[in-house]
Image (spheres, rainbow, N blue to C red):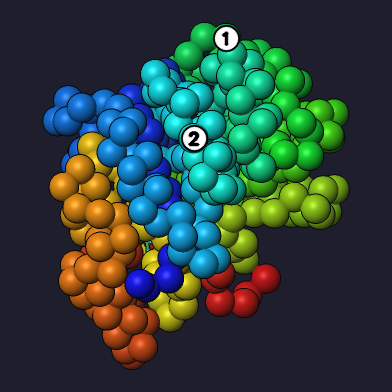
């Protein structure tokens, strides 16, 4: 069987927030396929657990990341799935908006080795970006119930919120948790005006005051200019290891590539068979040959998901 290092699972296609930059629930829903309204909102518990059982013997065992198109903590069987996955020996990571974190603190602490909580501003600014009143205070009180060493605060840097980066970094220090900044990879599609000199100054100040906080992707000045400009921009057209190491499972049971190419449904095929199957093999060959070509990755195959390391410029 072809090796994979990570299985990313959308437990839910629904969310209790509505972040402006979100490709699934935000203002510009740029990713329509598989979003709520077209399909059931929660992944089916039993087929998911059977799929995981079928790949637990892969050596080394892949890790599970609950992330994606919706809020995992909304799944009615979230705790059952987390506990069963832990029993099967999977290492688990969670990305959450934190609104329901406090309500599941015991299971999250017991089953997850990393919990990334997304905060995109301080206080009311965060509530306004995610369009959920009380979201900031609920997330922070949930984080206070987590094992601090397991938590990463994640901040998506957008044209509207970069002035809050310093407050966010101070909060991470106060909570004694790790942090990361992630550039909004759909900024080019939002049509929002960006004060690029202001953003670059703010980034430089964070790099100087908090050198332990990474930016994803790390971008130099001209790269940031290209990244936030209109039109597609692939961080590094000639390098990506992620595409071959991860399989994603959508909340409707469809396994797919990083950029949404469908490989087959876990409701009708075994996950092991899908991983080794023809659709995924063809996708892998296509990306490999693009990476090795003079023109590099095409933006039809790659949606610049930010997992690449950019070419050195900084
Ligand atoms: S919390 Fe995540 S899934 Fe929900 S709207 Fe915001 S970015 Fe989208
Ligand atoms: S979307 Fe692009 S950068 Fe992301 S894993 Fe796929 S090929 Fe790599």
Q: Nearer the viewer, residue 239 or 61?
A: 61
Horizontally, residue 157 falls left or right of residue 147, namely: left
Badge 1: how crowded within 10 Å, few (<14), some, or many (20+)?
some
Mark 2 residue element: helix
Q: Quadrant of residue 69?
A: top left
Horizontally, residue 40 falls left or right of residue 236, namely: left
Q: Is residue 46 above or below residue 287?
A: above
Q: Nearer the viewer, residue 244 or 86?
A: 86
Q: Position of residue 115 (x, y in %)?
A: 62, 37
Q: Quadrant of the N terminus?
A: bottom left
User: Which residue is rendered at x = 70% and y = 37% of the image?
Assistant: 151
Q: Position of residue 259 (x, y in %)?
A: 30, 57
Residue identified by numbered label 1: 134
Q: Nearer the viewer, residue 104 or 101?
A: 104
User: Which residue is rendered at x = 42% and y = 60% of the image?
Assistant: 246
Residue identified by numbered label 2: 84
Determine the quadrant in which ligand 2 lies: bottom left
Q: Is mark 1 within 8 Å of ligand 1?
A: no
């Amino acid at each position: 069987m072809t090796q994979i290092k990570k299985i990313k699972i959308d437990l839910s296609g629904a969310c209790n927030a509505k972040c402006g930059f979100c490709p699934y629930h935000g203002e510009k829903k740029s990713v329509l396929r598989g979003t709520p309204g077209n399909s059931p909102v929660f992944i089916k518990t039993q087929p998911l657990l059977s799929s995981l059982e079928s790949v637990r013997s892969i050596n080394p065992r892949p890790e599970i990341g609950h992330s994606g198109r919706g809020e995992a903590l909304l799944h009615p069987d979230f705790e059952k799935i987390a506990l069963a996955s832990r029993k099967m020996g999977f290492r688990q990571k969670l990305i959450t908006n934190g609104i329901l974190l406090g309500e599941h603190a015991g299971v999250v602490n017991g089953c997850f080795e990393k919990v990334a909580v997304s905060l995109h501003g301080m206080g009311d600014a965060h509530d306004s970006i995610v369009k959920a009143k009380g979201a900031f205070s609920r997330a922070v009180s949930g984080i206070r119930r987590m094992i601090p060493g397991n938590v990463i605060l994640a901040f998506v840097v957008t044209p509207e919120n970069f002035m809050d980066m310093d407050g966010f970094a101070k909060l991470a220090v106060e909570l004694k948790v790790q942090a990361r900044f992630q550039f909004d990879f759909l900024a080019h599609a939002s049509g929002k005006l960006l004060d690029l000199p202001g953003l670059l100054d703010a980034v430089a100040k964070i790099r100087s005051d908090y050198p332990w906080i990474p930016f994803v992707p790390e971008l130099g000045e001209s790269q940031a200019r290209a990244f936030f400009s209109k039109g597609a921009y692939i961080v590094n057209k000639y390098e990506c290891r992620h595409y071959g190491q991860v399989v994603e499972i959508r909340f409707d049971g469809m396994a797919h590539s990083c950029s949404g190419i469908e490989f087959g449904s876990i409701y009708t095929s075994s996950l092991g068979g899908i991983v080794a199957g023809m659709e995924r093999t063809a996708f892998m060959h296509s990306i490999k040959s693009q990476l090795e070509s003079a023109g590099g990755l095409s933006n039809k195959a790659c949606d610049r998901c930010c997992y690449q390391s950019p070419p050195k410029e900084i």
